[in-house]
């Protein structure tokens, strides 16, 4: 498996993969209204905008994009506030360790960038996955209406490595 920066040529494959997740996995855990809301925003233009301000990565196996994940920085140059974003593994590749490897890579990048914590807005189905990586549920949950669980990893004490 190769983990690399996403390119413009990957956009269509990544959009299809994200939508496949919403249709096959996320729809089992989230309300129809939330699925429709988030699914509607997933377009090539939206993803290209994300690429402009996030560090968007893909995992590739034999030329096929099998996962994606991004680091979004909501902080300042001298005080990063990093969040995992748009983290999806293609449904055909679930339960093979792909997500763990990609998340480990994102954690390494966050540490190398000097962040002390890494945040993630978790879908309902992924809370256990992130908890296994050392993330804990935040006390404040500002996106409860979107069925999102915010979690944080202390990068100095995180347990996951690629």
Image (tube, helix red, strand yellow):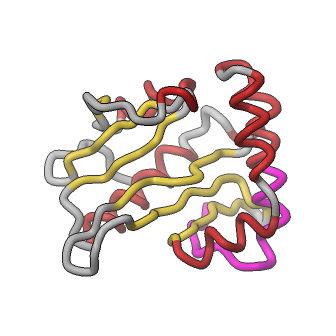
In the rendered image, residue 55, in percent from the top left (x then y), is placed at 51, 72
In the rendered image, residue 54, in percent from the top left (x then y), is placed at 52, 70
Q: Please report the residue visible at 45 percent of the width from the left and 53 percent of the height from the top.
A: 84
In the rendered image, residue 6, in percent from the top left (x then y), is placed at 65, 73
Q: Name which quarter of the figure residue 61 lies in.
A: bottom right
Report whether 75 appears left or right of 55.
left
Judging depth in this view, the residue of 20 and 54 nearest the camera is 54
Q: Name which quarter of the figure residue 106 lies in.
A: bottom left
Q: Please report the residue visible at 60 percent of the width from the left and 78 percent of the height from the top.
A: 52
Residue 120 on the magenta span: no
Magenta part of the chain: 1-17
In the rendered image, residue 125, in percent from the top left (x then y), is placed at 57, 25
Judging depth in this view, the residue of 67 and 71 nearest the camera is 71
Residue 12 on the magenta span: yes
Report whether 111 appears left or right of 143.
left
Quadrant showing the C terminus: bottom left
Q: Please report the residue visible at 40 percent of the width from the left and 55 percent of the height from the top.
A: 83
**Relative to 124, is 58 above or below?**
below
Q: Please report the residue visible at 76 percent of the width from the left and 59 percent of the height from the top.
A: 14
């Amino acid at each position: 498996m190769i983990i690399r920066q996403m390119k413009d040529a990957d956009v269509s494959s990544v959009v299809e993969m994200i939508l496949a997740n919403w249709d096959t996995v996320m729809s089992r855990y989230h309300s129809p209204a939330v699925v429709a809301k988030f699914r509607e925003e997933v377009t090539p233009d939206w993803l290209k905008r994300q690429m402009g301000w996030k560090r968007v990565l893909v995992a590739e196996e034999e030329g096929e994009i099998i996962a994606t994940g991004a680091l979004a920085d909501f902080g300042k140059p001298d005080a990063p506030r990093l969040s995992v974003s748009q983290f999806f593994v293609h449904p055909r590749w679930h339960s093979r360790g792909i997500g763990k490897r990609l998340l480990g890579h994102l954690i390494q990048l966050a540490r190398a960038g000097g962040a002390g914590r890494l945040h993630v807005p978790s879908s309902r189905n992924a809370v256990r996955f992130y908890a296994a990586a050392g993330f804990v549920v935040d006390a404040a949950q500002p996106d409860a209406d979107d069925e999102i669980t915010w979690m944080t990893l202390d990068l100095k004490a995180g347990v996951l490595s690629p």
